[in-house]
Amino acid sequence: MAMNRELREFLRSRRARVQPEDVGVPHAGHRRVPGLRREEVAMLAGVSADYYTRLEQGRHLQPSDQVLDAIARALRLSGVEQRHLHNLVRSTVTAREQGQALVSPLDAGTRMLLDSLQIPAIVVDVRGDVQAMNLLGRALLPGLEPLPSVSASHPRWLFLDSTARDLLVEWEMVARLSVGVLRQAAGRYPRDSQLHALVGELSVVSPEFRTWWAEHDVDAHCRGPKRFHHPVVGEIVAYTEAMQIASSESWLYAYAAEPGSPSAEALSLLGALAATSEIETMPQENPGGPHGIPDGNSQPSTGKPLRANGPRVQ
């Protein structure tokens, strides 16, 4: 994912989707390509056609913020797309110049906050790896596990685990948004080897990912209502909010149901089942040991949830 190639393909894809009549450009004669011509973008942005052409070709130019913002307006970019354009053209932080994402481990305070929430919640880093989940988060999202599990990648879970497709009623919408978030991360960290490997793997294995990645759409982190068809408690509508953890490249996702709704009752039941499973997997006291202290034959907790009147709660 060379930086100039990413910039070239992004600008071409954004130019192709803008119709001349949408920006007041006379639409005369046959057009060989969809959308605006390069010279029309240049005219709308107030730069020379040669300068914009060289920029779109991925040449190593250093346009000012004002020029990039003018091009963003000409191409009718959204806020997240405008930031993506800036990231593709240049890096503004030393870590980004190096091209590697700096992912810090969660501190004790964040983990305490996560565990204290009475709603499902997870923490995801810039590569889509799940750093931590609370008990309800694990129960709501079966098949997804926190690091260091091999099942900790949210993008891999979405595209490669059939559980995710069965669980998420609007799987395509969520998966497309995930591709956009990953595209934004790749623009900020163009030489991150783990991001390269993830994108390459998913492009080979998943036709949907390969198709949507080629569209060069970028998106912000997911928020709003999300519908689940849960294998244990049935239908759930949860309102999702993504909050970036201060001074980090990690986001906390929390899922809340409307109070008193069937979804809230389903989440409450799911929490009770998950808590019961957690208790049942804790080490048992050894009745024969002094003062109830387990002896050396006691088995430690596996941390794996048990079945509770149906499919396994995770």
Image: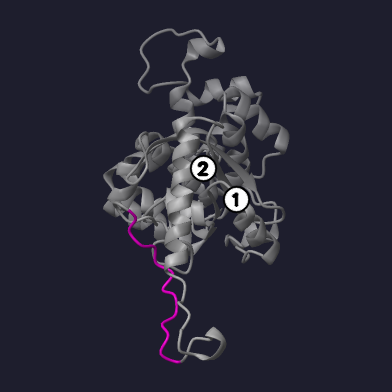
**Residue 255 on image: x %, y %:** 53, 42
Any mark on residue 171, and which?
Answer: none
- Whether residue 152 is visible here, answered yes or no, is no
Magenta-span inclusion, residue 300: yes
Magenta-span inclusion, residue 14: no
The kind of secondary structure element at disc 1 is strand
Q: Answer few, some or many: residues within 10 Å of disc 2's Cα (few below 14, many 20 plus, some between 14 and 19).
A: many
Mark 1 and mark 2 in contact? Answer it, CB < 8 Å. no
Classify 290 as above or below 43. Answer: below
Classify 145 as above or below 253. Answer: below
Q: Amino acid at mark 2?
A: Leu
Q: Residue at x 57, y 87 (%)?
A: 291
Any mark on residue 7, and which?
Answer: 2
Residues in magenta, as a range = 296-308
The answer to whether 191 appears left or right of 69 in the picture is: left
Q: Which residue is mark 1?
A: 251
- Counting the numbered discs, the total is 2
Q: Quadrant of residue 207?
A: top left
Classify 121 as above or below 238. Answer: below
The disc, 1 or 2, on the residue closer to the chain's N-terminal end is: 2
